[in-house]
Image (spheres, grey):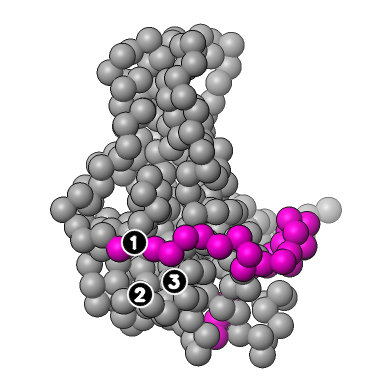
Amino acid sequence: MKKTGMKTNTFREKSCFNRINKINIYELYHRNSELNSVSLYKFSEGIEKAISDDGFLEAICEEKKLYNDCSTINMPDPNPNLTELNLFDVLYKRRSVRKFDKSKPVNLEELSTILFYSGGIMGKYEPFQNKPKCNLFAFPSAGGLVPTDIYFFVTNVEGLDSGIYYYNPYEHNLKIIDKGFSPQDYRKITGSYNLAVNSSFVVYILGDMELTGYKYGDRGYRFMNLEAGHLAQNLYLTSTAIGAGAVASGGFLDKEILEMLKLRDVGIFVLYEIIIGKPDLRVDYRFL
């Protein structure tokens, strides 16, 4: 029997969510982007429309032209010999690192290796039958559209000035967006300052809905988030393989990051934050 006068609220009833007409926003988004026997037909129609649109097919074959007016930095070739671990070793060792050793910066060759094997282009498919030319990225992407991009903030990389950069996977080089970013500046863009302040660099994965939304509609936003997860796992594994480490965070300030990257806040979204550096081996970071 229930005791009278006792509170019956559970943590579930106390949870605070933004709502529209008393419905949780996450519930509205998920239910309105899910597929059923009716919406599947419309979803398929959208895909057919996209793949028969010459303008769309041309757009997905084009290389992204971002920050063309910015200075370019060429990186050393990625070096797979930086590790002797096999894939299963890396999977076993992968943990979220929450204590970084500021006295041991990631160097430029290590950065090049992490970026290439996480988000670089591994090869190309030439046009075949009704399939357009496409680049083969290191991570899976719905329809091969690759709406995601890698931006990163550097504060402790040997051989690279502190600053804000865009990784151009088509040429495997860097575009300088801004110079002079300091560890204290992380306070302006993330709630994970204590994790970021001693790291070597912080990656922000951004997504652009233009092509993905045209082909997949609202469900494309789900695909874009899934893709960011694939890319983030690559960053974890490549960092672990070369003796660094990573920790993912969702506590970033979306609009502030877009402003620093000089990007519009319509159709472009900050999806994920991955903090990378050399682990502090004085701490058993695997269990923190």
Residue at (53% x, 43% y) in the render: 122
* Disc marking residue 160: 2
For the C terminus, the image quarter is bottom right
- Who comes first in sequence, dot 1 or dot 2? 1
Q: Can the viewer see residue 227?
A: no
Q: Which residue is mark 3?
A: 108
- Amino acid type, residue under disc 2 in the picture: Leu
Taking the view exactly as shown, the residue that stands out farthest to the right is: 1
- Disc 3: CA contacts within 10 A as few (<14), some (14-19) or many (>=20): some
Distance between the alpha carbons at the discs numbered 2 and 3: 7 Å
In reply to whether residue 78 is colored magenta, the answer given is yes
In reply to whether residue 99 is colored magenta, the answer given is yes
Q: Give residue 30's position: percent from left, percent from top.
A: 51, 33
Distance between the alpha carbons at the discs numbered 3 and 1: 10 Å
Q: Please state the extent of the stretch shown in magenta in the rendering.
A: 73-101
- Quarter of the image for residue 162 reads bottom left
- Amino acid type, residue under disc 1 in the picture: Asn
As helix, strand or loop, the secondary structure at mark 1 comes to strand
Residue at (51% x, 69% y) in the render: 110
- Who comes first in sequence, dot 2 or dot 3? 3
Residue at (31% x, 76% y) in the render: 161
- Who comes first in sequence, dot 3 or dot 1? 1
Distance between the alpha carbons at the discs numbered 1 and 2: 11 Å
- Residue 162 is left or right of residue 263, and the answer is right
> Pointers 2 and 3 in contact (CB under 8 A)?
yes
